[in-house]
Image (cartoon, rainbow, N blue to C red):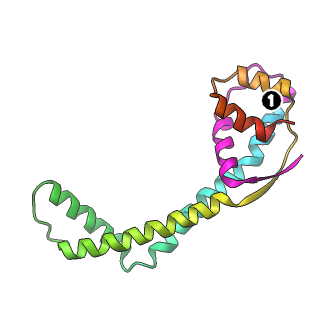
Amino acid sequence: MKKTIKTEKVLEVFKIINTAKYTKMNDDDKVKAWKIARQLKPVATKFEEDCKDAAEKFKTEIKDFDERLQKAQKFEQAKKDNKDCEDMTSGEYAAFLYEFKKYQELVNKAIMEFAQKDVKIQFDTISDDAFGKLMSSNEWTMEQAMLVGDVICE
């Protein structure tokens, strides 16, 4: 069956079935479940890579990002220890925080866009009986079971 699903749903389902136990399922259904997981994994991997790429890309929009981030962290630690920071002034720290907030907003917006992307995946679904055995093999909440069932069942 070919399905179009939002990336965020694929991520949630993959996270659940990637750690699922399959002890009560018969061998044919275990193989089907394994094949489904194999179809979902590249979507999860691409999402992670896209998020890392976005974070790196937006760093380039802030001059000396990594160096200033380290200085800001030292500044915060110095303030926590009631000491003066020699690497960064309060004004520089405030300016960096403003830029960092904008950076975070850009990264978060990109992540949300990635999560809302439709992806097409193709796999053989499992029967209700097989899904029942899968649920019996795991201690899922009803929410988890419904989420997984919506994707991998007939």
Measured as percent of width and height from the top left, residue 137 is found at: 70, 21
Q: Quadrant of residue 54?
A: bottom right
**Quadrant (top left/top right/bottom left/bottom right) for the C terminus:** top right
Label 1: few (<14), some or many (≥20) within 10 Å?
Answer: some
Residue, far left: 83
Q: Position of residue 13 (x, y in %)?
A: 68, 41
Say above or below: 4 vs 97: above
Q: What's drawn in magenta, residue-wise? A: 1-29
Q: Amino acid at mark 1?
A: Lys
Whether 28 is among the magenta residues is yes
Say which element carries label 1.
Answer: helix
Instruction: Give 154 or 51, whichever is nearer the viewer.
Output: 154
Name the residue that disc number 1 marks: 30
Which percent across, then down, holds residue 132? 78, 23
For the point 14% across and 70% down, which residue is it? Answer: 86
Q: Is residue 88 above or below residue 27?
A: below
Q: Is residue 94 left or right of residue 36?
A: left
